Image (tube, grey):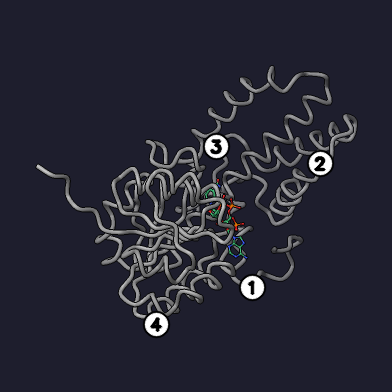
Amino acid sequence: MSAPRRRPVTVLGLGVMGRALASALLAAGHPTTVWNRTPGRSAALAGTGANVAGSPAEAVAAGELVVVCLLDDEVTRRVLDEAAPALAGRTVVDLTNGTPEQARRLAEWVTARGARHVDGGIMAVPAMIGGPGALVLYSGGQDAFLDWRDTLAAFGEARWLGTDPGRAAVYDLALLAAMYGLFGGFLHATAMIRAAGVPAGEFAPMVTGWLTAMLGELPAMAAAVDSGTHDGDGSSLRMQAAGFGNLLAACRDLGVDAGLMRPVRDLLDEAVARGHGEEGLSVLVDLLHTGATGSPGTARSSG
Ligand SMILES: NC(=O)c1ccc[n+]([C@@H]2O[C@H](COP(=O)([O-])OP(=O)(O)OC[C@H]3O[C@@H](n4cnc5c(N)ncnc54)[C@H](OP(=O)(O)O)[C@@H]3O)[C@@H](O)[C@H]2O)c1
């Protein structure tokens, strides 16, 4: 029996991530057309069977599914604009990192040109694409997602988050915030430990064990956020705010910049000043969530 015919697909953008996505589509047996601003990046893919298009419009015309993986939303808009006459009847899956509002605006723009739109957020590094740990979040056009779900599974687990085109982006960026918080904590801790004369490699197993233990706290903290009952569970903010001063003082003594830690200290102090001293860390979510325009009277600023 012959293998089922795979539908033709296109990838716009052959950075490290776009190349990994195109390779996964080729490996899944899709006739795959690729386009990139800098032509040299397509050589290896061409060697494994990709068709190389000379323009975004030519690339879009060749694929029923158009996967976009470019630097940012501005570049995406510019490249899709060049391909606009070829978009009708296509499904555009935008895996470029962006904000929820950018995803919603692109969805309007794409659908106004007769194409279907799905936004996606890749929770993986390029080497993970196509492997068991890769997760890609999707939202927007549900029919389009269902139509292409099996193809998108070539990248990793394809998780559907609903019809709001901005939904995948807000999950993506929130997960990145969690990741940067974790990495920021690790980097700061490592700077302290190195300043104390300990090699980072010696410290790494200890910090990994500690963070793994602390991850176990997250479900209870999330439940506290949802219920609004922040009982602190033996670790009051008052106690933590008092101890945090020691962390900053030690950094001063060690010659380590405490820039990553000071905002946490400020937040703890503010919570205590507002009367939350006997509550737990979960109450800080209420202080951070100031509404779309920010609330007056807080010491923090938004980006
Ligand atoms: N790499 C990761 O770990 C990772 C993980 C998750 C999500 N992502 C997301 O995936 C997307 C691509 O990331 P990447 O790692 O592949 O980045 P990258 O290697 O820097 O590639 C950027 C891509 O954008 C293109 N580009 C940049 N400026 C352009 C312009 N003015 N006009 C046309 N094309 C332009 C580049 O083309 P040239 O080759 O011509 O420069 C290249 O194809 C980003 O949105 C990123 O946030 C990446």
Dot 3 surroundings within 10 Å: few (below 14), some, or many (20 or more)?
Answer: few
User: The N terminus lies in which quarter of the figure?
Assistant: top left
Front residue of 225/293: it is 293
**Residue drawn where x is 57% and y is 46% of the image:** 178
Discs 2, 3 touching: Cβ within 8 Å: no
Q: Amino acid at mark 1?
A: Thr
Left or right of 262, for residue 124? left
Q: Nearer the viewer, mark 1 or mark 4?
A: 4
The tag on residue 112 is 4
- Residue depicted at 47% across the width and 68% down the height: 56
- State which mark lies toward you, 3 or 1: 1
Q: Tell me the kind of residue under disc 3.
A: Asp
Q: According to the image, label 3 marks what residue?
A: 233
Q: Quadrant of residue 211?
A: top right
Sequence-wise first label, 2 or 4 = 4
Residue extending farthest to the left is 1
Under circle 4, the secondary element is loop
Report the residue marked by disc 2: 258
Which of pointers 1 and 2 lies earlier in the amino acid sequence? 2
Whether the residues at callouts 2 and 4 have beta carbons within 8 Å, the answer is no
Label 1, residues with CA under 10 Å away: few <14, some 14-19, many ≥20: few
CA–CA distance in space, label 2 to label 3: 27 Å
- Residue positioned most to the bottom: 112
- Image coordinates for residue 283, horizontal then vertical, percent: 59, 51
Q: Give the structural element (helix, strand or loop) at label 1.
A: loop
Contact (Cβ within 8 Å) of mark 1 with mark 4? no
Q: Position of residue 118 (x, y in %)?
A: 38, 65
In this rendering, would 255 be left or right of 274?
right
Asked if labels 2 and 1 touch by Cβ distance under 8 angstroms, the answer is no
